[in-house]
Amino acid sequence: MIKADGKYFFLNTKNTTYAFKVMETGQLEHLYYGSLIDAEDGENLSEKRAFAPGNTVLYDNAHPEMTLEDVRLETSAVGKGDFREPMIEAICTDGSTSLDFIYDSYETFSGKKEFNTMPGSYGSKRDVETLNVKMVDANNGFTLILSYYVYADCDVISRSAKFINTSSEKVKLTRMLSMLMDFDHAGMKITSFHGKWTSEMNKSDTILSAGKFVNSSFTGTSSNRSNPFFMVSDTDATEISGSVYGYNLIYSGNHYGAVEVSPWEKTRVAYGINPRNFSWILEPSEEFEAPEAVMTYSAAGYRQMSLNMHEFVREHITRGNWKKKERPILINSWEAAYFDFTESSLVKLAKAAKKVGIELFVMDDGWFGERNDDKRGLGDWDIVNKKKLPSGLEGMAKKINDLGLMFGLWVEPEMINVDSELYKKHPEWAIDIPGKNHAEGRNQRILDLCNPEVVDYLIDVMSSVFSTPGLSYVKWDMNRNFSDYYSKYLPAEKQQEVSHRYVLGLYRLLKTLTERFPELLIEGCASGGNRFDLGVLCYYPQIWASDNTDAVSRLDIQNGYSYGYPQSTYTAHVSSCPNHQTLRITPMESRFAVASFGVLGYELNLNDAKSEDVASVEAQIELYKQYRKTLQFGDFYRLKSGIICEWSIVSRDKSQAVTMVMQREVQPNNPYLRIEQAGLDENAKYHFYGRKLEYNLKGFGDLVNTVAPIHIKQDGILHNVVAKFVKMPGETEDIKASGATLNNAGVKLAQSFIGTGYDDRVRYFPDFGARLYFTEKIDITE
Ligand code: GLA
């Protein structure tokens, strides 16, 4: 609900209030963001001042109390005494840079309008209310519209800003962020997520009592270096207690989130497009839209903050046919074959996949042009590699469809190899600086999406690929970072517009194609998670989270994503071992347990896999299909992290839950493990149980001799034969209890192996061991 009277502005969601007011001098003072408060109390929320501190700049002589440097603000530029991170910077025609935005008027309405140039959140008139505040620059007459979008149900308020050149001269924006807000205290904890290829979303905490912290990217993408999602919280906030603010940006290019503490111990958060190597020229009457920034507040720790963000992303970011549709279980050819495949080898893999219950077959990189390695071929989407695929794309799709599988394809439309037919025809379409050496990345260059002709070409060529009869899925990859930013299409004075214009070109491409092919399931990818952001998620419902498929690495990677993104947005595959990225060997069931807490897929050569692994895969898939809706769309809870990692997903109606526990490393003679669940209906009764699995005898090594009647040589022929027929019984977990008990007291699991005996009351739980448990609501009278 928005309550506005031209002086006070109160934006209320179900549990939070965001408030600001117009000061006597015309700037907007931020008053409050936190748990719900009374809109009548606006007067009490301002800081009271009689005189400004010494050595500060007064806004004007009429206000001796007023220095912009020590007021909490909703927006700020440079030149009027606020020395903190500005939201806007511009160079006017006369060379001056001073801007002074003063309140003019406001409007509110139900619903939210679409942006002209980029995607944003969306909702019905019941879901979202808009507040637009018009500010006018007292120095030059520019207009700034600050927009606030209130999503009451998920406790999210998002913001965007628009700069309109309402002056009669041209202006050059050199910084145009989306939001700015100030807390009245310092010493807050910033939690951000950093990484690199195969190691995305590592969580990192920084306590900021002075100076500045910046979470930004300059790769041209939202990047795996610093994901655009971050949090600001109380230092003692926990999963279930304390104040936590979450921030994200609906943008896929270079982002910049700055948190700065002022000398008076106020903490500023400013967020938007990275100003580095950015400028934008606006002629009179032209305007610039800054992307939408997302904010949420939880008074009850990280868990609730994540649940808010998940709900927001699920309901108001992802869209289209696949928004709420259960995602198919796929097999991807990449780790199974890399570039080395033929039609018949792929069909053989697809047959094996069909046998175990897989639903979608994805042919990854290598099907077009001379693409037998990563040095050539990108761009040649219209040339199918007939040596590998004699029946062409259509024939391949038909063969896969005839097996009863959906067919999917890999593409990397934004890229070009110098060694390609496309480059021969259009060298000017690649981003590089004429006459200067170009830095290289994966032997490929980036196509200049600032040039509308290139975008039009990609729309055409991708439309023809996407029209392949029988195609149901596309993996859209993007595998290199920007260097040598330069567009041959743009004049010299607009070269600093390249990174943002590229993103806008990309959005036009994605918008056109997703509108044209609404049935297609498209999965984003950028060397794994190098472009995992809300901008991409406005077009694709899911993204390949990481090229790392190792189950232990994935614990951290997926745990990181879970803070800001629902599990339906990140995909996870079971692959072979030793793992291709880490050489680690983890149990097949653990790989499945972790992958099923994202959108499950497989990426291994099933024809080469051990028959017992193939049997496990078949059982896993059967099980996953039963719980798929809950696993993909239920509420995600992080229960524990550390040596023991626990996650749980509860269906929206709280009728069932799936819980995972995984151990990174055995702790000898360890304490009992208790699983405390979360999110269950406290008044309902549930059945909690585990899977009844059997374990390979060889996992116990030569301990077999403690029970064998004759001596067995470890790994000898006899050991192998016995292991084939004798399985070790897994432990049983089977209890009935109320939701209140399961949520609060938890379940004490069977003892795990501690070196003193083993039977079916003991959990076989080696390094990287994992379990899945199921909780089903039962009739109260049972
Ligand atoms: C990237 C992707 C991989 C795979 C390869 C193909 O690295 O992240 O999943 O598709 O490209 O070249």
Image: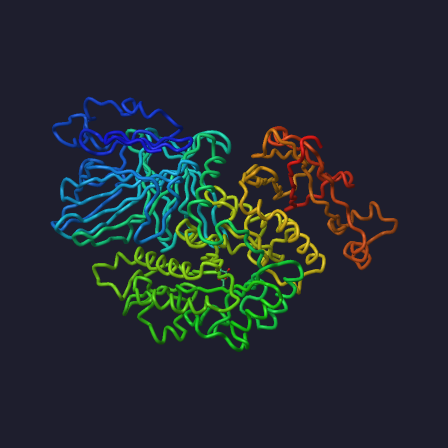
Picture quadrant where residue 510 is located: bottom left
- Residue 487 locus on image (x, y percent): 28, 63
Q: Which sits in the foreground, 449 or 653?
A: 653
- Residue 250 locus on image (x, y percent): 37, 48
Q: Which residue lies at the image location 56% right of the left edge and 70% below the top edge?
A: 398
Q: Which sits in the foreground, 395 or 416?
A: 395
Q: Which residue lies at the image location 65% right of the left edge and 41% below the top edge?
A: 774
Picture quadrant where residue 655 is located: top right
Against 46, is 420 above or below? below
Against 117, is 37 above or below? above
User: Is residue 316 left or right of 667 when viewed as pictured?
Assistant: left
- Residue 474 locus on image (x, y percent): 48, 61
User: In the orientation shown, which residue stands out farthest toward the right?
Assistant: 709
User: Is residue 489 left or right of 782 when viewed as pictured?
Assistant: left
Q: Tell me the quarter of the image containing the N terminus.
A: top left
Q: Which residue lies at the image location 52% right of the left edge and 72% below the top edge?
A: 394
